[in-house]
Amino acid sequence: MDDARPHRRLRLALLFALPLAAYSLAPRNGFVGDDHQMIERGLYTRSLANVPQLFTHDNMWNADGGRFHARARIDTFRPLTMTSFFVDHALFGMRPSAFHLVNLALHLINVLLVFGLARRLGASAGASLLAALAFGVHPATCEAVHWINGRFDELATLFVLAAATVWLDGLDGKRAWWRPLAVALLVFAATLSKETAFVLAPPIALVLVGRGGPSPPKRAAPGPDWRGWRRVAMALLPWVAGGLAGLGCRRLAIEGVRVTVDGQQLAYALARLPLLWLDGLRVLALPQFEVQTGLIEQYREVPAARLALGLALAAALVGLALLRLRRGRPALAVGAGAFLLSLGPIALLTFVRGWSGWGRYLYPSSALLALPLATAIDALAARLSPSLRRPAQVAAALALVACAEQTFLAGRAFRDDRAFFTTAIADHPGAPSGYFELAQVELGDGHPERARTLVAQAIALVPPGLPFAWARAGMVAWRAGDHALALSVAD
């Protein structure tokens, strides 16, 4: 007992210290990109009296008073996260450092929840620590923490992880009447934080099969075990109730879940989903940070080889997850299901202009992928000889420090708009959107010559199949004072 307590304190200290070090630049950063219209220049942010209206309007209402919703192709309804921004302003004013600190606090809570969930699923304390820290300092998902707008993903993840924690505590014998209600309320809160919760909750329900599903007794009579299925249905009820409550609230507020797609657009999105899976697995397995400003540009082409590889990796992941699930080990099924499903809605954004980012979309599933990582670490440790365990521990510690360093350096990209879009150009020099955005920044800073140079560079990169990009090129060129270039683009 006395020996275990210092170890617990050390683990807790590490769970706080390493992510805090990785994100120590965050409080120095400002508002970037969508932060300006969503928060800083929001029409109603400065009064808590406007909070009730967040629950009766779409997510962009604070930015434009409802103009976006009138023409939106994809609805967003995230009143709980928007409320948190309003509360931040009421408590701390319009100081970006306060918003960043709240983001960091939410991330630390998620790191602790991942550690606790891994332990509840049977992973050792050491493996759970490594997996939680890998999630906590991973550079591929740091955009969700460094960027204030990433709070949507943080909050949705927090509520889903909390619901899973409460539910698993009930399985472990700590049953109470309030647990199903708490799970339903947490799932409901997650759906009001971001739509991703609707696809995160179903994989969590797979835990029911591995941990709380029925183990039917042997019976002489053939036929289905209705008592077992009744137990599963009752266990699923809080999750279903929370999700339905979220859909109902959404229906009352913005008249349903609108995704304006036709058959051609749906086929377009489905063709790019394997590419998203492939890129997601790549940046998670080979940790790296990158800024993406235009999904529509990044995934315009569909190379056949990458498409086939993405499908093959997804199939292998599903097969391995099902095999582990049959053996009563649900962690991989939860993580793989969250990863594959959560990128589905992102595929729909690949044909809608204006959607940027990448790491924040991976944040929720990376939290759940940390659970099978913990069990994999335990399995690997069991197979290592005693002489190799210490070198393996040192290698894991060095890898975590390297990831934390990348995440720390990534913080510089979120200092301001200039740093953000300069980084976007460096990460994706062949995408025109970064040049357009930086040109707007130069115009705002009174540097039209620099803006014209950037517009010319962007125009050279715009492919013929992106008419909106040509229209934008003409608009930015005209604003920069290069009327001849604007007219030539129009021609």
Image: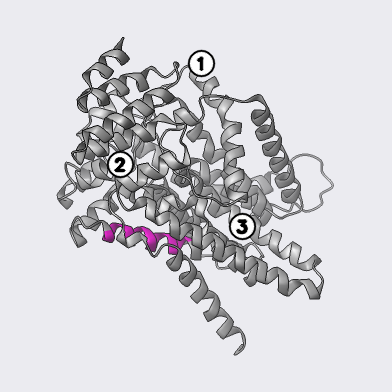
Q: Nearer the viewer, mark 2 or mark 1?
A: 2
Q: Is residue 125 visible?
A: yes
How far apart are labels 3 and 1 at the CA level?
Answer: 37 Å
| Nearer-N-terminus badge (3/1) | 1
Question: At which x and y percent is residue 420?
Answer: 36, 46
Question: At which x and y percent is residue 343?
Answer: 53, 38
Quarter residue 302 falls in: top right
| Nearer-N-terminus badge (2/1) | 2
Question: Badge 1 local density, few (<14 within 10 Å), some, or many (20+)?
Answer: few
Labels 2 & 1 near each other (Cβ < 8 A): no
User: Disc 1 residue type?
Assistant: Gln
Q: Which mark is residue 108?
A: none
SS state under label 2? loop
Q: Which residue is mark 3?
A: 371
Q: Which residues are magenta?
A: 97-110
Q: Residue furthest right?
A: 220
Question: Badge 3 local density, few (<14 within 10 Å), some, or many (20+)?
Answer: many
240 magenta-colored: no
Q: Which residue is mark 2?
A: 34
Q: Residue at x 28, y 45 (%)?
A: 35
How far apart are labels 2 and 1 at the CA level?
Answer: 29 Å
Of 27 and 337, nearer the camera is 27
